[in-house]
Image: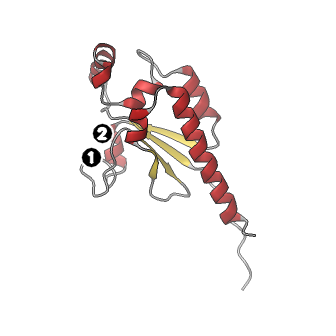
Amino acid sequence: MGMSPPKPLQRPRLICVYNADTGLIEALKHAVHKAVRPETYPCSLCALTYGAVSMRGDWKRFWRSLDADVDFYHRDDFTRDFPALGTGGARQVALPVILVSEAGEEPRVAVSSEELDAMADVDELMARVGERLSHLALALSRVASPA
């Protein structure tokens, strides 16, 4: 039996999940809520990464530069695609959240709802995501090339 060639390393997948549902009416309700009562706004990920109506340019440039695939979900489409982790699922995660998945494994929490709620600004978020991905890359390189 010969050794099989090593599998190429897949890029990790970041899954950013907003604590809001899809749709124009929902988006308008959230924009008004964020502007009028920001202290009670339920989605810190949105508050950190969006201005009044669009995604912040520094955040968009950051995630496009990552060595990872990045997907964005709202609560309803996340629950549809990940029923076990979504609303009412057996392993429901608190939203908002940033999850990470490697090699098609079930996603796990990279940046929790509690961490997101405590962040002061998008710079802190970018630093945390970069740090978590660098730890992941280091762990993967150890697995790929054992000493």
In the image, is residue 4 above or below residue 107?
below
Amino acid residing under circle 2: Asp
Say few, some or many: other residues with alpha carbon within 10 Å of mark 1 (under 14 / 14 to 19 / 20 or more): some
In the image, is residue 53 above or below residue 77?
above
Say few, some or many: other residues with alpha carbon within 10 Å of mark 2 (under 14 / 14 to 19 / 20 or more): some
Of all residues, the one furthest to the bottom in this rendering is: 1
Q: Nearer the viewer, mark 2 or mark 1?
A: 1
Mark 2 highlights which residue?
76
Residue 1 falls left or right of residue 49: right
User: Secondary structure under badge 1?
Assistant: loop
User: Secondary structure under badge 2?
Assistant: helix
Residue 145's x, y, as percent?
A: 73, 65
Mark 1 highlights which residue?
87
At horizontal 62% and vertical 54% (from top left) the residue drawn is 10
Label whose residue precedes the other's in the sequence (2 or 1) = 2
The residues bearing labels 2 and 1 have C-alpha atoms spaced at a distance of 8 Å
At horizontal 51% and vertical 44% (from top left) the residue drawn is 14
Residue 101's x, y, as percent?
A: 51, 53
At horizontal 38% and vertical 40% (from top left) the residue drawn is 114
At horizontal 71% and vertical 67% (from top left) the residue drawn is 6
